Amino acid sequence: DSGVTQTPKHLITATGQRVTLRCSPRSGDLSVYWYQQSLDQGLQFLIQYYNGEERAKGNILERFSAQQFPDLHSELNLSSLELGDSALYFCASSGNTGLANEKLFFGSGTQLSVL
Amino acid sequence: AQKITQTQPGMFVQEKEAVTLDCTYDTSDQSYGLFWYKQPSSGEMIFLIYQGSYDEQNATEGRYSLNFQKARKSANLVISASQLGDSAMYFCAMREENYGGSQGNLIFGKGTKLSVKP
C-alpha cells in the first residue's frame, strides 16, 4: 500500500459530462501529481500542486482543471468529456524536497470510461 | 524530443533466467535521477529502483539492479532469477533536478511488457 488514496476506482460516464476524481496524498507529502495513462500516449504528466499552489503544468487540456485543498487532498475535474478521455488517471505524491532522488508514490488509479 | 526511450515493447523470459530491459534518456542537466516502476495487471505503479546521476555505483535492490552507463545515457534494468510474478509492464522514468524544487514530476517512457514463461 503506497499510502495514496484515489476515489473512485472506476467511473463510467457519457460524452459531454463532467466528473471529479479525488486524491489523498501520503501523510506528510505536500506535492500531488496527476498523470493520465492511455494505450496510445503512455503515462502523461498533467499537473503538479505543492502545498495548495500549482507548481508545474504538463499536457493538461483546458477542459481539465485541478486544485489542492488546505488539507492537501486534490481533485481533478474533467469536463465536456470525449471518448478519447477514457484512460487510467493516477495521482501520486511526494515530499517535494526538490532533490532528484525523490520518488513518487502512486495511488491505484481511477479508470475512466467515457461512453 | 523524447526524453525517455524504451525500445522493447514486449519481452519474454524463461522463469529463473535473467532479463535486461533497456532504457535510454536525453537530458542536458548534470543532476538528474532515473527510476524504474513496475505496473502489474492490477494497475498500480510500484517503485523498484533509483539511480542518481552522480552515483558511481550501480544501484541494486534485491533481484533488481540498474546498469547505468552515463556516457551512453542508458539506464537498463536487470532482473535476475525471473519469477512468474515479474510479469508486468516496466517503466523507466527521469527527473531533472531544479534547485528550489520547482519541478518534481517524473517523465516516463512508454514501457516494456515483460512476460515470464514457466
Image (tube, coloured by chain):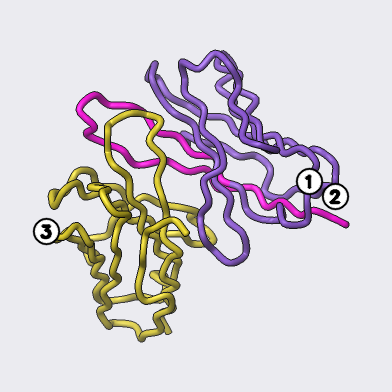
Chain colours: A yellow, B purple
Mark 2 closeness class: few <14, some 14–19, many ≥20 residues within 10 Å: some
Lower sequence index among marks 2 and 1: 2
Question: Which SS class for mark 3?
Answer: loop
- Using the image, name the chain to which the residue with label 3 belongs: A
> Residue at image x 41%, y 84%?
A12
Assign the C terminus of chain A to one quadrant of the image. Answer: bottom left
Question: Which SS class for mark 2?
Answer: loop
As displayed, is residue B38 above or below residue B20? below
Residue A70: which numbered mark, if any? 3
Q: Decide whether residue B113 is among the magenta residues.
A: yes
Mark 1 closeness class: few <14, some 14–19, many ≥20 residues within 10 Å: many
Q: CA distance from mark 3 to mark 2?
A: 48 Å
Q: Which residues are magenta?
A: B91-118
* Residue in front for this viewpoint, B104 or A38: B104
Q: Decide whether residue B19 is among the magenta residues.
A: no
Residue A51, horizontal then vertical, whole percent: 16, 48
As displayed, is residue A18 above or below residue B79? below
Q: Amino acid at mark 2?
A: Glu
Query: On the picture, is B96 further left or further right than B15?
Result: left
